[in-house]
Amino acid sequence: MQLYCNSLTEYSRLITNEVKIGDLLLGNGHPIRVQTMTTTDTMNTIATVEQTIRCIEAGAELVRITAPSKKEAENLLHIKNELHKRGYHVPLVADIHFTPNAAEVAARIVEKVRVNPGNYVDKKKFEQIEYTDAEYVEEIDRIRERFTPLIKICKEYGTAMRIGTNHGSLSDRIMSRYGDTPMGMVESAMEFLRIARAENYYNIVLSMKASNPQVMVQAYRTLINKMFEEFNECYALHLGVTEAGDGEDGRVKSAVGIGTLLEDGIGDTIRVSLTEDPELEIPVCKDLVKRYTINSSQPIVHSIQSVEKFPYDSFNYQQRETFAVDNIGAKHVPVVIADLSKIEKITTQHLESIGYTYNEITDKWTIGDTAADYIFTGHQLLDFALPGTLKVIVYPAAWVLATDKEKYFPIFDGGGFVEAEQKSELINFVMIDCFSDETPINDFTFLDELGNDKSVVLCLSSTHQHAMLAIRRMFVELSNRKILNPVIITCDSHWQTADEHLIHYATEAGALLLDGFGNGVCFGMTNKSYQLQDSSYKNASGRNYSNNISVEQFINSTAFSILQATRTRISKTEYISCPSCGRTLFDLQETTAKIRSRTNHLKGVKIAIMGCIVNGPGEMADADFGYVGSGVGKITLYKGKEIVKRNIDSDIAVDELINLLKENEAWIEPASVSKL
């Protein structure tokens, strides 16, 4: 397979076909456009108009509105006219799923229509059907017959189209041949794309959304590769992680998936799908996009030495092979290292921010599921006994003075370790600055010596403007030299706000973790950024942080959320929650909060909360249990993709979900976490 981007060592936007959406140009090197979707009832013209205006004023360049039937599609004209009357001319997108007739109406009114190939013509009944080649071709002909009228209308009216595949709503036909795979997602879209090309219609955007960032990233990469292979060109790409959820988890999951692709220059428009008011999605989009805005005042970026071939599969996840150094590497889950080095005097109270609580009366530590595994204290040795599982990393001069060499471990720079006279017999952490300057790769001569030392854990970081690319290049070098030491991904943020820091960590570390790199993470802030924090994140958008959350607690929580989003370490309940829209049949934000409050202690359980039948059960993808709106005031519960309780009154539905969890032995009573 060829590369899915221009370069894996140098940042460069992937040039895609230009798309015209009203007066807005997208793709072909134009700025990355940000968009969102309304949550109001489409038949409520004024409410939809006013919410659309709030989104526009927040910075949305496109706004999508659901049109589940012809009547909503027809009402788009009233919405558009009212917006124009008020002086707003941002392009509108009609969201279509099961109703081709609605799409054909909408295409005559708005600037763009979105169709989902999984349910536009095909149906999804979760049936396994074996198709002969002839039967499969007949199904494609049926799609062509039903899809072609929409194409002709779009050509006539100059309407753009998004062919938007969702991982959870692949049709039975696609599932039967390709399975629930990224390739199945790609082929689902390619079938529609081939039909459009046969009609000489090219004003198309494509998307490959999934609630699992790993699946989403692999699908986009595969799609790009497939388009170049078949058409020798790439269509414009809309990026998004579907059903990401709310708060920190929703932002992290979105940033991991979208940010990974943006890092490689992929993406022409993005939407962050949060279970929050749509205007709150836009600042997150902006924080993601601004990282790639060219600024003439930025210093010249040093080049990262290119490679002819990457020694890993970009299209299929495989964890990098390593040996174990204590609990780091090999088959161990990634560790979290908390940076406490900026605290002048560390006390037992400071450990509460990273998952440890000390009880003086019982002389015991309570350890949470998101407790850091190591702490970095710089020059500081602690004057109190540590919890049994926690270990400390310090600079070599401090380590020499430490009496407990089984709790304290040194961290060297690359050359310093080679020259050091005293080293730990158990673990030595070694920092390597990856391509922050023009150091040629053959100057990293100490790598071979490190690779022969079974006590060394490498800590890769970079101050390069595109740090992820620099660190990834160093992983390639380790592979080329057959160095199997475990690696900690180290990332400092120079940004200011909570969302900016979160997106920085999730993008740079998440992209590496999704490719199977890294046996742990350590996040910090530059001195300037740390000093700007007031130890309170109460104003972080969409967040449920307490008023006194510390910087260290925020970073620790973010680290575990990123590991969860990349499916590399599961430490909490996962919620797959749709962002709400005009189809939603209950208060999604309130219900999500209620379910979260009752179930957030169920480590590793995946619960989907879906507003309507469009998003569930299909969009639930790999959820263990589902809570899906089936009518006004009615909820249907799922185990996997099977209905187990239908049309329950919403007043008792959360209790019934708890009962379902108990019936399937997925429930444990809330209890105190482990104690040492």
Image (cartoon, rainbow, N blue to C red):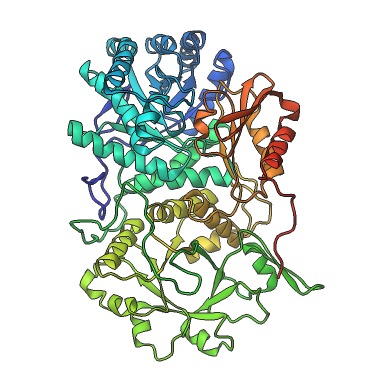
User: From what the image shows, is residue 175 above or below residue 597?
Assistant: above
In the rendered view of the protein, which quadrant contains the C terminus?
bottom right
Q: Nearer the viewer, residue 43 or 536?
A: 43
Residue 365 figure quarter: bottom right
User: From what the image shows, is residue 674 above or below residue 121?
Assistant: below
Residue 524 appears in the figure: no
User: From what the image shows, is residue 663 above or below residue 124?
Assistant: below
| Residue 246 screen position, x and y as percent | 58, 40
Q: Nearer the viewer, residue 73 or 532?
A: 73
| Residue 517 screen position, x and y as percent | 38, 59
| Residue 591 screen position, x and y as percent | 67, 33
> What residue is drawn where x is 55% and y is 19%?
48
> What residue is drawn where x is 68% and y is 33%?
590
Indicate left or right for 118 with 55 as reference.
Answer: left
Q: Nearer the viewer, residue 108 or 136?
A: 136
| Residue 533 screen position, x and y as percent | 57, 59
Count up the numbered dots. 0
Identity of the residue furthest to the bottom in this view: 421
Residue 458 figure quarter: bottom left
> What residue is drawn where x is 32% and y is 55%?
298
Residue 424 appears in the figure: yes
In the rendered view of the protein, which quadrant contains the N terminus?
top left
Residue 480 figure quarter: bottom left
Indicate left or right for 538 with 306 as reference.
Answer: right
